[in-house]
Image (cartoon, rainbow, N blue to C red):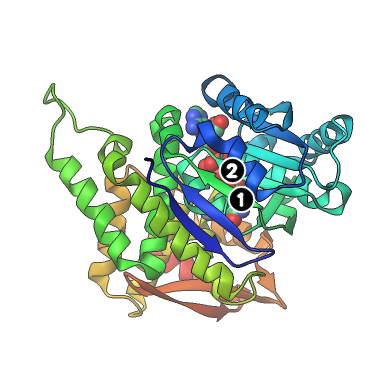
């Protein structure tokens, strides 16, 4: 019998996040249970998922009695655009998807965000089942109902809150995820550890330290981050989903507590923007997290030792703890982002590993914060 971890999220109509190895092969049954009125499933699939996993998903939907249409979308953040979002809407219309049918998003955070936004707006909202395939999407973006596309002037500028009907995480899918994309997901995992889950932080550190101490068979190098987390990955995903579930239930619409999930993201988003999205979300968030930890330590708000430990863990996860952009470049990019509310920026500042606060900051104070952390 397969061991399935089910986490209930009481947001929107309420939904389950299921985590189990091999879940993909039974996704049809799960979708049919969660969306009992659906006759059709429209699958939106990232091009990199077509070969390894899409057939399993479509076959399972078909076996569960759901007729299944498939749209492949181009991969990568540069394609999280209004144009591709429009293609998804057109596809839903061509497939004659009705209000009781379901969209299935198969891919990483980019696919989930964009297909989720199409589900939120097509016919003023249809059910969306998220099948996240990257670590980042499993631990973060597939849960909580934030959907969006990027505009030329910034990231996630058009979007909607639309909670999924179901989220299915199958860790076996991570087998085909490239090592560097896996590390990107680790940035969000470490973020959860710092913002409120010291046990998770310690568990990840133990895994990665064990890895650093164990050379592979050739004795030449240590195994990859992905391999070293293999045994623990389902537990790590479940911990992150539980952390996110608690925050989302407290503050579904991101007016208070949920802002804490933006730890590392003020500077992280600025790095993404400065690089023209050449630097991935995970890497940018890692550097952003390191910068805000060092800034908090230099202002006496976080123990120096904790800030050093965060930077050390990021490096162990093969993530950057530095950026080459200047204070001026970062501050300008951060202030052009959508985070100002009523002229105030809300900076998430850690007070140690496992706790953080929300600090209102005037825009003119931001450069000094960044400078303290560079
Ligand atoms: N909605 C939210 O709450 C939220 C939270 C965090 C991040 N995000 C968004 O998530 C996105 C980043 O997510 P991401 O890192 O998953 O990016 P992504 O979707 O671009 O995926 C990264 C790369 O991995 C590939 N890939 C994914 N799964 C694979 C697999 N199993 N096998 C082989 N290749 C695979 C993709 O094709 C892509 O090339 C950003 O757009 C970010 O804004 C949203
Ligand atoms: Zn993020």
Label 1: few (<14), some or many (≥20) within 10 Å?
many
Of residue 100 and residue 366, the one placed in the foreground of this image is 100
Q: Is residue 99 visible in this depiction of the protein?
A: yes
Q: Residue at x 43, y 58 (%)?
A: 240
Most foreground residue, 235 or 330? 235
In the image, residue 353 above or below residue 322: below
Per the image, label 2 sits on a secondary structure element best described as helix
User: In the image, residue 145 lies at what x, y percent?
Assistant: 65, 57
In the shown orientation, is residue 137 left or right of residue 95?
left
Is residue 277 something that shows in the picture? Answer: no
* Category of crowding for the residue at label 2, using alpha-carbon neighbours closer than 10 angstroms: few (below 14), some (14–19), many (at least 20): many
Q: Is residue 237 above or below residue 132?
A: below
Residue 212: x and y, percent?
A: 17, 41
> Quadrant of the image for the N terminus?
top left
Left or right, 10 with reference to 318: right
Circles 2 and 1: CB atoms closer than 8 Å = yes
Establish whether ligand 1 lies closer than 8 Å to the Cβ of label 2. no
The residue depicted at 65 percent of the width and 39 percent of the height is 105
On residue 30, the disc is 2
Label of residue 222 in the image = none
Q: CA distance from mark 2 to mark 1?
A: 8 Å
The disc, 2 or 1, on the residue closer to the chain's N-terminal end is 2
Up-down relation of residue 371 to residue 79 (above or below)? below
Q: Residue at x 43, y 30 (%)?
A: 178
> Residue 87 versus residue 130: which sits nearer the camera?
130
Horizontally, residue 166 falls left or right of residue 245, namely right
Which element is circle 1 on?
strand
Residue at (66, 52) in percent of width and height = 165
Residue that label 1 marks: 166
- Of tags 2 and 1, the one toward the viewer is 2
């Amino acid at each position: 019998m397969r061991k399935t971890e089910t986490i209930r999220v009481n947001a929107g109509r309420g939904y389950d996040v299921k985590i189990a190895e091999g879940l993909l092969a039974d996704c049809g049954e799960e979708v049919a249970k969660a969306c009992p009125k659906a006759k059709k499933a429209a699958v939106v699939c990232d091009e990199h998922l077509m070969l390894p996993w899409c057939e399993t998903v479509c076959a399972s939907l078909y076996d569960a009695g759901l007729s299944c249409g498939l749209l492949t979308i181009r991969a990568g953040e540069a394609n999280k655009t209004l144009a591709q979002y429009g293609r998804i809407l057109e596809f839903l219309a061509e497939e004659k998807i009705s209000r009781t049918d379901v969209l299935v998003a198969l891919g990483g955070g980019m696919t989930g965000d964009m297909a989720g936004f199409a589900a939120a707006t097509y016919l003023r909202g249809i059910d969306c089942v998220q099948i996240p395939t990257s670590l980042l999407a499993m631990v973060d973006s597939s849960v909580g109902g934030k959907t969006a596309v990027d505009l030329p002037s910034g990231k996630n500028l058009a979007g909607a809150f639309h909670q999924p009907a179901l989220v299915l995480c199958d860790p076996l899918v991570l087998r085909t995820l490239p090592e560097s994309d896996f590390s990107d997901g680790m940035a969000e995992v470490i973020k959860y550890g710092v913002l409120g889950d010291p046990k998770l932080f310690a568990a990840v550190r133990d895994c990665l330290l064990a890895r650093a101490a164990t050379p592979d068979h050739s004795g030449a190098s240590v195994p990859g981050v992905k391999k070293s987390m293999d045994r623990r990955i389902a537990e790590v995903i479940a911990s992150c989903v539980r952390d996110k579930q608690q925050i989302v239930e407290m503050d579904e619409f991101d007016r208070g507590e949920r802002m804490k999930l933006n730890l590392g993201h003020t500077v992280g988003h600025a790095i993404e923007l400065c690089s023209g999205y050449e630097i991935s979300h995970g890497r940018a968030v890692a550097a952003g997290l390191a910068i805000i930890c060092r800034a908090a330590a230099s202002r006496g708000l976080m123990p120096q030792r904790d800030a050093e430990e965060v930077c050390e863990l990021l490096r162990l996860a093969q993530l950057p703890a530095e950026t080459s952009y200047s204070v001026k470049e970062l501050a300008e990019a951060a202030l052009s982002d959508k985070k100002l509310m009523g002229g105030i920026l809300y900076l998430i500042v850690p007070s140690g590993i496992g706790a953080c606060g929300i600090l209102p900051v005037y825009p003119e104070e931001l450069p000094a914060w960044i400078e303290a952390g560079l």
